[in-house]
Image (cartoon, rainbow, N blue to C red):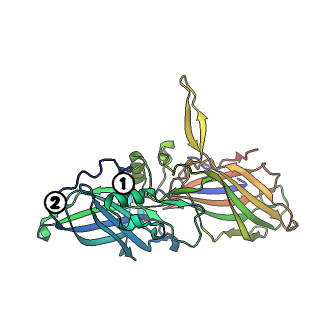
């Protein structure tokens, strides 16, 4: 991954640590129900999320947490419960020689259940999406309903961001220290069911490298294309992709394209299109001024695919993703009815995937106001957990798409 100006763009990839798990529910997931003895079973779950050292915004915090436990053999629902304001611990973890900060939500419950293998889900901030079947159906009905839940249309501002785990399989084990009580103990990681965009703007007109006279400008809108119009609540990923997310543990490494996550699915019939955010109150920038857009924008996990031909004797097409940015800018002399100057669209050369949990932080250095299409940009990739750390590479000028 390289670092790529008229736009300075920081692409921050948040790849939460997730564990490998099967995703599709097999036809024989629930063999014929059989008579099994019931025991007290302790549910000891640590629900983990990697977070930056300064913490996370209110809408990304866990406000309610639903735990679903289904017996694999019988399909009996052992637990389907919402926990409001769950107990929270913060800890530090060493990953590849670096310190990560984690939030850990500790679940300690006791249920009456058989002691066979359990399917376990953890869902946060998702109650508004839950159907009756997902909340109170039989085991197969609950799992099918969870698997079918989609986030549709525009993800609203002001709502808590849904967070979800994949399905885990856990085998309770007898704890001799507690008088023979069986304990189902494991760590479960969750990922945000969205991608996140944040933006800031620097008015560099008249400064070094600028060919435009210093003047006040206004940012009217920004756009990214193309992003999906819907996505799943429960992640749909290949096992290797989950393993990769676990190994990345909140970071991205410049060790080849294999570090990007490509193997995930969107709902059938999902459409990718231009996403535009119009500023009701335009962002005014005096010469030399900097302004951070205070809003955070949550978009759908996306897979905007392009086809590239591979060179070699057996040429075929390989799927790649591509995303492009556009800004709308007005000069101080412009009338309210005048169309804005369009900076872009320009391809984001470092953004190869918009898998859930990706944070794209855009810093636009506006040096010139050229004709539409005649633009440049620079992109730097850092980690979300440690945003001060660069992944590597130098600042490269990339010509805008004509």
Question: Which residue is most to the top?
Answer: 313
Q: Going by the image, does 210 lie left or right of 346?
A: right
Q: For the residues marked 2 and 1, what is the alpha-carbon distance in whole angstroms?
A: 29 Å
Q: Going by the image, does 318 lie left or right of 41?
A: right
Whether residue 17 is visible: no
Secondary structure beneath label 2: loop
Whether residue 370 is visible: yes
Secondary structure beneath label 1: loop
Q: Going by the image, does 226 lie left or right of 265?
A: right
Q: Residue at x 83, y 51 (%)?
A: 371
Q: Which residue is the site of mark 2?
A: 36
Is residue 65 positioned above or below 114 on the image? below
Q: Going by the image, does 136 lie left or right of 286?
A: left
Res 144 → quadrant:
bottom left
Q: Which of labels 2 and 1 is toward the front?
A: 2
Q: Please tell me the numbered disc located at residue 383.
A: none
Query: Percent from the top left, x then y, of residue 100?
Result: 42, 62
- The answer to which of 37 and 62 lies nearer the viewer is 37
- The answer to which of 364 and 229 lies nearer the viewer is 229
- The answer to which of 242 and 371 lies nearer the viewer is 242
Query: Percent from the top left, x then y, of residue 383?
Result: 51, 57
Q: Earlier in the sequence, mark 2 or mark 1?
A: 1
**Within-10-Å neighbours for mark 2: few <14, some 14–19, many 20+:** few
Is residue 287 positioned above or below 244 on the image? below
Q: Quadrant of the C terminus?
A: top right
Q: Which residue is the site of mark 1?
A: 19
**Within-10-Å neighbours for mark 1: few <14, some 14–19, many 20+:** many
């Amino acid at each position: 991954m390289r670092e790529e100006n008229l736009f300075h763009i920081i692409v921050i990839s948040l790849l939460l640590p997730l564990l490998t798990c099967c995703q599709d529910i097999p036809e024989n997931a629930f063999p014929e129900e059989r008579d099994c003895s019931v025991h007290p079973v302790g549910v000891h779950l640590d629900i983990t999320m990697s977070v930056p050292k300064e913490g996370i915004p209110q809408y990304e915090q866990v406000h309610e947490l639903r735990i679903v436990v289904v017996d694999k053999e019988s399909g009996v629902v052992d637990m389907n419960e919402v926990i409001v304001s769950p107990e929270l611990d913060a800890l530090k973890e060493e990953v590849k020689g670096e310190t990560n900060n984690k939030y850990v939500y500790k679940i300690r419950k006791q249920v009456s259940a058989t002691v066979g293998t359990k399917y376990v889900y953890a869902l946060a901030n998702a109650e508004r999406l839950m159907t009756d079947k997902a909340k109170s159906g039989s085991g197969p009905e609950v799992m099918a309903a969870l698997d079918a839940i989609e986030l549709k249309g525009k993800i609203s501002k002001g709502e808590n961001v849904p967070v979800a785990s994949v399905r885990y399989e856990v085998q309770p084990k007898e704890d001799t220290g507690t008088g023979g009580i069986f304990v189902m103990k494991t760590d479960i990681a969750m990922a945000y069911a969205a991608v996140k965009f944040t933006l800031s703007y620097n008015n560099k007109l008249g400064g070094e490298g600028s060919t435009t006279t210093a003047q006040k400008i206004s940012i009217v809108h920004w756009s990214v294309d193309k992003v999906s119009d819907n996505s799943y609540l429960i992640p749909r990923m290949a096992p290797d992709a989950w393993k990769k997310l676990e190994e990345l543990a909140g970071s991205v490494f410049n060790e080849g394209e294999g570090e990007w996550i490509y193997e995930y699915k969107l709902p059938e019939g999902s459409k990718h299109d231009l996403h535009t955010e119009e500023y009701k109150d335009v962002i005014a920038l005096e010469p030399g001024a900097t302004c951070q857009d205070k809003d955070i924008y949550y978009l759908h996990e996306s897979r905007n695919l392009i086809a590239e031909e591979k060179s070699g004797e057996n040429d075929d097409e390989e799927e790649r993703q591509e995303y492009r940015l556009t800004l709308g800018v007005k000069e101080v002399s412009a009338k309210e009815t005048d169309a804005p100057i369009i900076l872009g669209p320009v391809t984001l050369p470092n953004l190869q995937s918009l898998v859930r949990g990706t944070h794209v932080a855009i810093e636009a250095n506006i040096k010139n106001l050229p004709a539409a299409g005649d633009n440049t940009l620079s992109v730097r990739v850092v980690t979300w957990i440690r945003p001060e750390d660069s992944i590597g590479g130098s600042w490269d000028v990339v010509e805008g798409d004509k």
